[in-house]
Image (cartoon, rainbow, N blue to C red):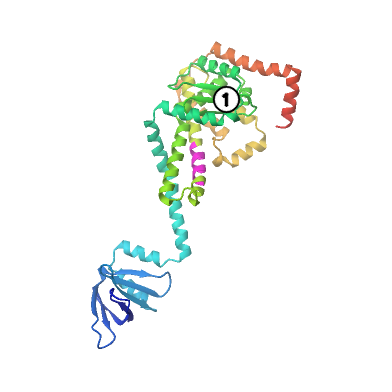
Amino acid sequence: MDAIYFDGHSSKPHSVILKDQFEVLEIKGLDASSDIERYWPYSDITVESFSRSQKTLLSFGDFPPERVEITGEHADMFAKIVLQHASNIKQYEYKITKMNPNRLVATSLVVLVSVISFYVFFVAPYIAEQAVKLIPISVETKIGEAMYNNMSYIVDVDSVKSKKLEAFYEACGFESEYDIRIDYASDVMVNAFAVPGGQIVVYEGLIRETESWDELAALMGHELAHVNQRHSFKQIARGVSSYLIISVLTGDVAGASSVILDYAKQIHELANSRAHEREADLVGMEYLKAQNIRPLAMRDLMQRLMSSQDSVTVQIESNLEYLSTHPLSKNRIAYIDKMIENDNSFNYDYFDKAAAKSIWLELKADFESEYKDPEKTEEHKVESEYE
């Protein structure tokens, strides 16, 4: 087989003949006067190729190496002979060089996304869990305060009713290592959330939905579970660790890598948020049990929230369960019922906590007085027209 040989010391090409001699490649000059006669052990030859073109480069020796350039239909044949004696890594490298450029780019992208996804979904949660354990509550509280200060402009806090909510929490008898602060948000939104470090915000719209004091207690137990289980803080730790791996893998946090991260991070946080909501429900139920508060109050609250939605909203929620930050209300009701049914320790005589019930009645009375006030009643009507 004719080929071109370069001795590694000059750029002058030499026409040579190649022969397969079992364990070695024999290289001899075409000219009778040529003194080129080389024997390369196959195991020491490096194979290079150019995509799918019929061209193969064989190299041998230390830098600068000797090289043989083979062109034509027999180029792949010699490459295969050499690779029979090569390591698995060299064989894999050769396959990559022969890959179509478009396919190579696509494969590289798939590998990159797979690595990132594995880290974001499996490694980051573990790292976050371990990192959070090492961070003292005092540091978490300061971070939470800074976060809440930055978002406080979107929360219209009623300081008087906030004190009532804090008194309600105390009357329930729940316990925490955190200094729990509760804000009453004057907004018809049916929502509540917990910030790292002990800050809880409850919206008026959600309080309006309650029909008994223990339903509000169940809500408090749920949000307290978020605080005590450090859910929000774990979300932050996971997000930070995800950004770090993207930076290491791509060296381009601000470019294409950030797009990949934002997408992966959204799905990741939504999935973990659902897991955290379930845990908060179940841990919150344990808080109710510890204080002899009616356990079915948690189920009743979920049932009412689901019933208050129109059929269209419920259908949309059912269709988008994967992208919902909370489990479906019907699913939450199902596992709460199952928990109560399978745990005999929930068979206790629950009773009203007079102080807590009194505060809840005050809050509900405030709503009724608003309807009796002609000016506030008119405001409510206008507000309802735009909801």
Amino acid on which the number 1 mark rests in the picture: Val
Q: Residue at x 48, y 25 (%)?
A: 198
Residue 293 belongs to magenta span = no
Quick check: 374 left or right of 18?
right
Quick check: 142 left or right of 184?
left
Q: Is residue 289 visible?
A: yes
Image location (x, y in percent) of residue 215: 57, 21
Task: Pick the residue in front: 299 or 49.
Answer: 49
Q: Secondary structure at mark 1?
A: strand
* Residue at mark 1: 202
Task: Pick the residue in front: 123 or 320.
Answer: 123
Q: Residue at x 57, y 16 (%)?
A: 164
- Span of residues in magenta: 263-272
- Disc 1 crowd rating (10 Å Cα; few below 14, some 14-19, many 20+) is many
Q: Is residue 218 visible?
A: no
Residue 209 vertical position relative to residue 260 in the rendered view, above or below = above
Image location (x, y in percent) of residue 285: 49, 24
Residue 265 vertical position relative to residue 91 in the rendered view, above or below = above
Q: Residue furthest front?
A: 10
Quarter of the image with the C terminus in it: top right
Q: Main secondary structure of the magenta part?
A: helix
Residue 291 vertical position relative to residue 83 in the rendered view, above or below = above
- Numbered-mark total: 1
Task: Pick the residue in front: 83 or 71.
Answer: 71
**For residue 111, what is the image quadrant?**
bottom left
Q: Residue at x 54, y 16 (%)?
A: 168
